[in-house]
Image (tube, grey):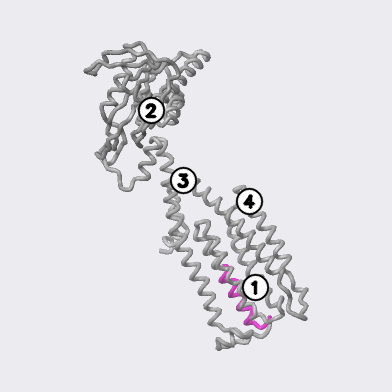
Amino acid sequence: MFARLRDWLFGRGATENLPERVREAIRQQQDRSEILIGWAELVLVGLLAVAYETTTMAAGVVQEDYSFETEVFVIYGIFAVIRLGLAYRRLLPEWFLYVSAIADTALLIGLIYSFHYKYAQPAVFYLKAPILLYIFLLIALRALRFEARFVIVTGLAAVAGWIALVLYALSGRGGPPNITDDFVEYMTSNAFLIQAEADKVLAILLTTIVLAIAIARARRLLVRSVSEGAAARDLSRFFDPGVAARIRSAAMSIKPGEGELRDVAILTVDLRGFTRLSTELQPDDVMKLLQDYQGRVCPLIVSNGGSIDKFLGDGILASFGAVAPSPTAAADALRAADAVIEAADRWTNERRAAGLPPLSIGLAAASGRVVFGAVGDGERLEFTVIGDAVNFAAKLEKHNKDEKTRAVVDSNTYAKAEQQGYLAPAVRERRPGRKVAGVADLVDIVVLA
């Protein structure tokens, strides 16, 4: 039971089975927390130093031999600067974190101890110093790291330090303890009330326990959040960014079979000659070629407002206005087509210059009403577009071979794009009344390349 409580409080069981990339993300969060803690320590010691150095000694009392606050502040200030520097360089060892927590508490306890010297009063005088409240700030400061163990160490160090001060006051070496049971006498004179000191110790302990439990719970939420964040970033590489955002922002769990009607534009891109070339290349070379091709084409589609619906081997199916409705879907699709054609021409020239066989693309665009939604069996879902426009675009892309072209679009989509603000980079050839395989009616097409 003790082992389970230890693991729950210290969070060891929550991270030991996580992937290294997730543990690294948590370490980065903690490193940033240590920088924040370092600055907080530096500010705290500065405030305490100003407060101490601007107060005056008791009238007619000389205690210069015991006035050691300045030296303590200087030493601790140097310590805080070194700690902050190590935090920025991510070089803080774990043992140093414990030393830092204990040093913070020791500084505060030492300053409280100096009160009866500074003001020439019995030792019980320092037990009423309001600076004790800073103990709770130091304990809370350790919560920034989201590890209960440092909160516990700081709290226990504070309890030990305060008990030491109480025992010293009771010993009589710092002056008579003046033990009393009268609360009024305790509040109005240098008297010692054991119940008051027990309350302070109990308050520190309870604060430490409550905060440690809260941090243990928060750390589990942190681990879960970092894990899900890392998973979301990884999954975003497999999903279109728009689809990933839609999944994250969905008010309810996404179910298969739910769809929405959209007026969209569809763009299909195919790499010509890839099937033959893939049989001649090594598997790694095939994948590198695909990566080179997709790395050139996909950013152009996305930057023009498109969403990559799926990769079909060397084919790319993209939609415009599906993930989010767009009044310029057709124009965006043709702008993306122009950019892809230009990039394909540059790629061909680069391959020729490098002595590699040139590759060309086939491209087609179409528009119409489709259903956009999730399909699958409930365990594995995929967002996709379904409708005549998708099939029509695929058939137009294949029709490029019959027309001896690289890129075409039907005239209706082209006219719609012009209405939406599309400006062609050159005069386009129009070919009316073409017979496209799989399409019943004749199609008027516009040649893009």
Residue 170, position as x, y percentages in the image: 62, 82
Q: From the viewer's side, name the closer residue of 168 and 396.
A: 396
Q: Which residue is mark 4?
A: 86
**The N terminus, quarter of image:** bottom left
Tag 1–tag 3 contact (CB < 8 Å) = no
Mark 4 is surrounded, within 10 Å at the Cα level, by few (under 14), some (14 to 19) or many (20 or more) other residues, namely some
Mark 3 is surrounded, within 10 Å at the Cα level, by few (under 14), some (14 to 19) or many (20 or more) other residues, namely many
Q: Which residue is mark 2?
A: 420
* Quarter occupied by residue 378: top left
- First along the sequence among labels 2 and 4: 4
- First along the sequence among labels 3 and 2: 3
Q: Secondary structure at mark 3?
A: helix
Q: Secondary structure at mark 1?
A: helix
Q: Which residue is mark 3?
A: 22
- First along the sequence among labels 4 and 3: 3
Q: Is residue 208 left or right of residue 275?
A: right
